[in-house]
Amino acid sequence: MTKLPERLLQLRLEQDFSQKSLVREMGLALNTYVRYERGEREPTASVLVQMADFYDVTLDYLVGRSDERK
């Protein structure tokens, strides 16, 4: 999942969220999310689904298996 951190950062910046505001919206711990964006930790499947739904993209796009967002 090498593209996941890049995609998370890109999507967050596109929607003009700070990390703090994003984790409040998603109900995640700030420290955990920061580690996702840095590639230091991988989210569980349920968190990946939550993120894909939040950003309205496919799981394949989120994890870098596709460049098609929908």
Image (tube, rainbow, N blue to C red):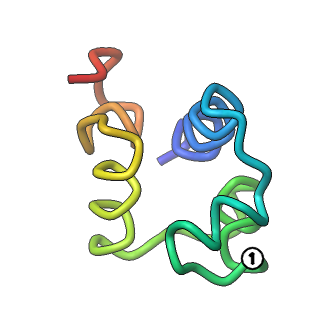
Tell me which corner region of the image, top left, top right, bottom left or bottom right, holds residue 15: top right
Q: Report the side of 20 relative to 39 (left or right).
A: right
As drawn, 31 above or below 15 = below
Describe the element under mark 1 as helix, strand or loop: helix
Q: Residue at x 47, y 70 (%)?
A: 43
Q: Residue at x 27, y 16 (%)?
A: 68
Residue 16: % across, % down? 71, 34
Q: Report the side of 52 relative to 8 (left or right).
A: left
Residue 28: % across, % down? 57, 79
Q: Report the side of 1 relative to 31 (left or right).
A: left
Report which residue position mark 1 lands on: 30
Identity of the amino acid at label 1?
Leu
Tell me which corner region of the image, top left, top right, bottom left or bottom right, holds residue 7: top right
Q: How crowded is the residue under tag 1: few (<14 C-alpha within 10 Å), some, or many (20+)?
A: some
Q: Residue at x 50, y 69 (%)?
A: 26
Q: Residue at x 28, y 51 (%)?
A: 53
Residue 65: % across, % down? 31, 31
As drawn, 59 above or below 42 = above
Q: From the image, which quarter does the C terminus lie in?
A: top left
Most distant residue in the top direction: 68
